[in-house]
């Protein structure tokens, strides 16, 4: 329950709605409670008139009008409160969803390595839906019922303390019995949710990689795997629900016995003259009003349990540790005291391993000066990408220091650091939307002149100008409507517009044919002009003109030198050069191990 209170306090700006709903609930309860009194008065008049006693039709009509007035007021207030309840729930949904997204954007890359996108989405939806459903139910039904119940107890106690005692005993007993069953219910619920999360995660992955699914003809496997999770959830639900409903039948039977005693007391005491018929009718109505919440208790407990499970999940994500100095937290810091001196990038005795596991990089020492173009060559999985990840501080070094412009990357807000670095990823990594939006991604307002200039320099203008909608062409999810080379040129234009002094190229041309490669390479040459550039090499031809090549072996720097120097040392680069011309299968395989294409 603490988590629900935390959620309500977290969304404390909604207090006018909370207050309105509480006041509405009091008014709904008051109008409901007055009705049995009016009916009691009318019953007594009718009974009296039937026996030839005092009473007039006019007074009965006035009581009927009073009932009409109370009903109309009740409907009106219920609907106004219902409207506030809906408003509260959607505004709460907005607050919780935005905070969740805000939180995810603040988390380190590490977190996302261990979670599936679909799982994150499924968890967000479930936890927030369960919380808002609960509060909506609480506002619209449960809260007015709670107030009614409380008033019924007081009124009943006034007429018959025994009835009130019985009513008072029922509720805590019922809630206690329900809570006992709820523990086991929760265990099943968590197991079910795990299945939904895994299924949701895979669902999103399969949809995002539909081409792979289609090309490997794995549709049947994917749908079967998806269905299997839902089958498991159905199996778990069968056990969970059967247990719950067996317990509920037992609980309700106990309740029926208690209500049997209540009705018996009422009938007998009325017959013995303790109450008038009117009061008996009133008390029956009040007792029935008190019974209603118990009847819907299963639903209430069910919704509450889901909300508790949902809010626990929500706060588990909210409790994850943020990436230090992340852009959303350190937005106010837009610049730091960068040094103009060389080196621009420096690795000083850097070790790094993912997940506290084996070191991927060991004792890396490397200084890169302004304007230098440095290519990294090494076996696939040898740590080239990891090296540039450390510069962008996507991961913290295990030991040693990585510095950019003279400052340790650990001390610079990551947003400021990453603005200094332009990246062209191996897969172009575009978003759905227009070409314009993609080139201007992260740049705010961009004029057509700036767009055209960037696209022209990236060698992308030739194909953009042929499109009927030009920059406003929609490119589909991750740019599926463009060719590989076109996507790369858009991503080069995006990096050009960002105009960062340091550039990382996860050699983008590796998957392209020669013509497309040439088109992209022309853009890349423009992009590299005047920038300190790190190239994760996949083609020997493109790195023959760099200033230095760094080769990696077993997570350590093996050699550093100009292409001409390394061509003669007999090291990795020299070996790869010699293999390049070979047509032997073994040599081709060796090149592939280094991620080199020809
Ligand atoms: N996010 C991660 N979590 C755990 N291990 C990782 C992660 N990313 C990479 N690794 C591991 O770190 C090692 C280095 O990977 P890295 O991606 O840096 O290699 P690379 O040289 O860039 O390879 P390639 O040329 O094939 O892209 C590999 O053994 C890889 O399995």
Image: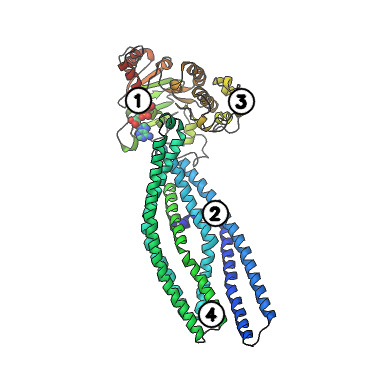
Q: Position of residue 593 (x, y in %)?
A: 33, 22
* Residue 459 in view here: yes
Q: CA distance from mark 3 to mark 4?
A: 80 Å
Q: Position of residue 352 (x, y in %)?
A: 34, 33
Label disc, if present, on residue 280 of the rendered structure: 4
Q: CA distance from mark 4 to mark 1?
A: 85 Å
Q: Identify the residue under disc 2.
A: 89
Where is 289 relative to 388, above or below? below
Tell us which disc is closer to us: 1 or 3. 3
Q: CA distance from mark 1 to mark 3?
A: 38 Å
Crowd tier of the residue under label 3, counting other residues whose Cα lies within 10 Å: few below 14, some 14–19, many 20 or above: some
Q: Nearer the viewer, residue 468 or 89?
A: 468
**Where's ligand 1: which quadrant?**
top left
Q: Identify the residue under disc 3.
A: 470
Disc 1 residue: CB within 8 Å of ligand 1? yes
Q: Identify the residue under disc 1.
A: 380
Q: Secondary structure at mark 4?
A: helix
Q: Position of residue 151 (x, y in %)?
A: 53, 72
In which quadrant will I find the N terminus?
A: bottom left
Crowd tier of the residue under label 2, counting other residues whose Cα lies within 10 Å: few below 14, some 14–19, many 20 or above: many
């Amino acid at each position: 329950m603490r988590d629900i209170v935390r959620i309500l306090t977290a969304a404390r700006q909604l207090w006018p709605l909370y207050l309105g709903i509480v006041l509405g609930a009091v008014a709904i309860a008051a109008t409901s409670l007055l009705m049995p009194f009016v009916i009691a008065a009318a019953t007594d008049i009718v009974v009296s008139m039937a026996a030839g006693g005092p009473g007039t039709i006019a007074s009965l009509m006035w009581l009927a009008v009073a009932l009409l007035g109370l009903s109309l007021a009740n409907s009106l207030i219920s609907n106004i409160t219902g409207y506030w309840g809906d408003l509260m729930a959607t505004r709460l949904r907005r607050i919780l969803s935005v905070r969740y997204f805000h939180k995810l954007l603040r988390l380190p890359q590490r977190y996302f390595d261990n979670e599936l996108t679909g799982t994150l989405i499924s968890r967000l939806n479930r936890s927030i839906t369960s919380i808002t459903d609960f509060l909506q139910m609480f506002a619209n039904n449960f809260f007015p019922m709670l107030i009614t119940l409380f008033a019924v107890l007081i009124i009943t106690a006034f007429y018959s303390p025994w009835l009130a005692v019985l009513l008072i005993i029922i509720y805590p007993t019922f809630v206690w019995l329900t809570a006992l069953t709820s523990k086991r219910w929760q265990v099943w619920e968590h197991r079910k949710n795990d299945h939904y999360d895994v299924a949701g995660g895979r669902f999103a992955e399969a949809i995002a990689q539909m081409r792979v699914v289609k090309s490997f003809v794995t549709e049947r496997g994917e749908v079967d795997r998806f269905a299997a999770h839902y089958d498991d959830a159905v199996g778990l639900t069968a056990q969970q629900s059967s247990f719950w409903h067996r317990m509920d039948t037992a609980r309700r039977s106990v309740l029926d016995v208690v209500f049997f005693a209540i009705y018996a007391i009422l009938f007998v005491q009325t017959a013995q003259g303790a109450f008038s018929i009117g009061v008996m009718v009133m008390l029956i109505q009040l007792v029935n009003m008190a019974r209603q919440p118990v009847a819907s208790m299963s639903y209430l407990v069910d919704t509450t349990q889901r909300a508790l499970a949902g809010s626990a999940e929500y706060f588990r994500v909210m409790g994850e540790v943020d990436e230090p100095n992340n852009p959303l937290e350190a937005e106010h810091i837009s610049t730091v005291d960068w040094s103009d001196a060389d080196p621009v990038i420096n690795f000083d005795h850097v070790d790094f391993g993912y997940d506290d596991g084996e070191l991927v990089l060991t004792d890396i020492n490397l200084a890169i000066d302004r304007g230098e173009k440095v290519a990294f060559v090494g076996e696939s999985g040898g740590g080239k990408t990891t090296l540039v990840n450390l510069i962008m501080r996507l991961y913290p070094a295990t030991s040693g220091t990585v510095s950019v412009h003279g400052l340790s990357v650990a001390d610079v807000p990551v947003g400021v650091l990453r603005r200094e670095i332009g990246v062209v990823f191996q897969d172009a990594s575009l978003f759905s939307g227009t070409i314009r939006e993609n080139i201007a991604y992260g740049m705010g307002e961009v004029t057509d002149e700036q767009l055209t200039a960037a696209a022209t320099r990236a060698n992308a203008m030739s194909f953009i100008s042929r499109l009927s909608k030009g920059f406003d062409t929609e490119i589909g999810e991750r740019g599926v409507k463009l060719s590989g080379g076109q996507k790369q040129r858009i991503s080069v234009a995006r990096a050009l517009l960002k105009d960062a002094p340091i550039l990382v190229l996860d050699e983008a041309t590796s998957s392209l044919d020669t013509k497309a490669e040439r088109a992209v390479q022309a853009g890349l040459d423009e992009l590299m002009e005047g920038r300190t550039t790190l190239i994760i090499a996949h083609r020997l031809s493109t790195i023959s003109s760099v200033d230095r090549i760094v080769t990696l072996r077993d997570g350590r720097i093996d050699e550093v030198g100009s292409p001409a120097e390394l061509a003669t040392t007999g090291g990795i680069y020299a070996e790869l050069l010699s293999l390049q011309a070979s047509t032997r299968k073994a040599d081709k395989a060796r090149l592939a191990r280094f991620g080199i294409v020809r």
